[in-house]
Amino acid sequence: MKTHSLLTSAHFPKVSDMQQSVSHFRLKAVCSNCKLRELCLPVGLSIGEMRRMDDISHLKRGYARGDYLYRSGDRFQSLYAIRSGSFKTQVLHEDGREQVTGFQMTGEIIGLDAICTDHHTCDAVAMESSEVCELPFNKLEALSRELPSLQRHLHKIMSREIVRDQGIMLLLGSMRAEERLAAFLLNLSQRLAARGLSPTQFQLRMSRQEIGSYLGLKLETVSRAFSNFQDNGLISVKARAVELLDLPGLRTLVGK
Amino acid sequence: MKTHSLLTSAHFPKVSDMQQSVSHFRLKAVCSNCKLRELCLPVGLSIGEMRRMDDISHLKRGYARGDYLYRSGDRFQSLYAIRSGSFKTQVLHEDGREQVTGFQMTGEIIGLDAICTDHHTCDAVAMESSEVCELPFNKLEALSRELPSLQRHLHKIMSREIVRDQGIMLLLGSMRAEERLAAFLLNLSQRLAARGLSPTQFQLRMSRQEIGSYLGLKLETVSRAFSNFQDNGLISVKARAVELLDLPGLRTLVGK
DNA sequence: CGCCGCGTTGACAAGACTCAAATCTAGTGG
DNA sequence: CCACTAGATTTGAGTCTTGTCAACGCGGCG
């Protein structure tokens, strides 16, 4: 789950530490143009190559809470890298049932589900003011034929999504309500930490209802679990403001 | 979910119907060498291109019930196309909990989870005598840089896995026991039909325990659900021999 | 023939859901 | 700036589904 593994490891010889720093800095500068952190930074592309990424992508701003990035059934054109803000994805069942399949935050890639049918199979909805970087998939495929490291990275991103989904299947299939919520909070904490934010204090962007949908629980059950955690001194929670007080305790709950 | 969509649709002009048949036949003949049905047939590769697929892959036979194709933690080298038989994949939780994440049958691709970390994140276990076609991933990537249609197809396969997993998340998160089992039986039925087998009469390859693990239920609950279906005339079941008597009735149950 | 794994069934308990009511919060309009 | 309202959250009480524990039956194999 190390975000910079490819960049910080063997790809740069140790002798050129200074140069690595400089190079790293310039990469960041270029990359911050389009903020394709997830897609660019860890790949180890040269600056020229990164510019080519930049050329095929374009920024889309101004998504407000509740806006759709795409809807189930929409024709598939592009993947989207979230540049700021966050989204949820949800699938809809014929009979009206719906389920949140994920909460995506800055730097994550969204839209991978649509490749197999050329149509989106879920909705993506902004949970706050957000910006995305659109990546036309045809161009991304063409470029990845030329740049093996980009190709590999694209495959890794898709594979990571598969592994993530399987983790949720495990959660939904074999955990009880409080275990699920603890796992959810720890996952959030970890992802926030990876973005340099506080791993213990944060504002939830989603409602109890949405958390419940994601975790396969009713909103009342989520609310009760929050209250229990607070009573047991594991967290402090007031509406959407959460502080994790006892990370080891939470980890014990999920059994790892 | 149409397996041959790419082959039967726009890729071949209608005027050359005869030629399509012939070409289709020759493709099948070549392909039956390595039985990469899922990976080759729908791609629309030329015969020469398909031979190159054949060159990088090799057959591995002799997996018996209970044999591991790979284990969680194994170093990732290859994807595997199931040539005959069937496998289950299962993830293991630190505290000993385990969950079946999928049952794979002939023609399906297995191992996609391992790309993101270079290590397998689940076990793959044969459920009966099976053969697989090993596809070294480095070579597959190299070849897919040369053959855009292969590249696209690989992406589609990965995307399909993501969509499949999201469907299971929906099932685990929002369906009750009998709905889950009905969905499972209908999915099995559909996949058998796609392979030219009977969609209504078949032998289960997995135990009640394994079905339960997959569906997030205890084996007793699965057994009871089977019994209820039989009492209601939806199916006939004796141990692992199943006959679906009322497909519409089962569809009604899952709400579509 | 007896053992053992798998499947079925029953009785009961625990966890999660449903329904309902009371607060609380954030956003709106005066 | 404040009152108001719609939506979100919390909490309680009772119900329902599923899990747990236990007994029993079936069928294959040594």
Image (cartoon, coloured by chain):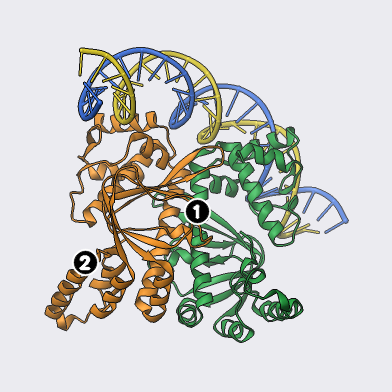
Chain colours: A green, B orange, C yellow, D blue
Residue B40, quarter of the rendered image: bottom left
> What residue is rendered at 24% in x and 63% in y?
B35
Residue identified by numbered label 1 = A165
A86 in relation to B249, above or below: below
**How many numbered circles are shown?**
2
Tell me if A26 is positioned left or right of B200 in this view.
right
Distance from Cα at disc 2 to Cα at disc 1? 34 Å
Q: Nearer the viewer, mark 2 or mark 1?
A: 2
Q: Quadrant of the N terminus of chain A?
A: bottom right
Q: Secondary structure at mark 1?
A: helix
Q: Quadrant of the C terminus of chain A?
A: top right
Q: Residues within 10 Å of mark 1 (few under 14, many from 20)?
A: many
Residue A221 visible in this rendered orientation of the protein? no
Dot 2 corresponds to which residue? Answer: B33
Could you say whether the residue bearing mark 2 is in a helix, strand or loop? helix
* Residue situated furthest left in the rendering: B18
Residue A118: image location, x then y, percent: 39, 70
Marked residue chain, label 1: A
Q: Mark 1 is on which residue type?
A: Asp
* Residue sitting at x 39%, y 76%: B144
Using the rendered image of the protein, determine whether residue A41 is visible from the camera's viewpoint. Answer: yes
Chain under numbered label 2: B
* Closer to the camera in the image, B200 or B135: B135
Q: Are marks 2 and 1 in contact (CB under 8 Å)?
A: no
Which corner quadrant of the image does residue C29 belong to?
bottom right
Considering depth in this image, is B186 or B118 the residue closer to the camera? B118
A130, B115: nearer the viewer: B115
Q: What's under tag 2, amino acid-wise? A: Asn
Choose between A96 and A159: the one closer to the eye: A159
Give how far across and how far down residue A156 sits, in percent. Answer: 51, 65
Where residue D9 appears, x then y in whole percent? 68, 43
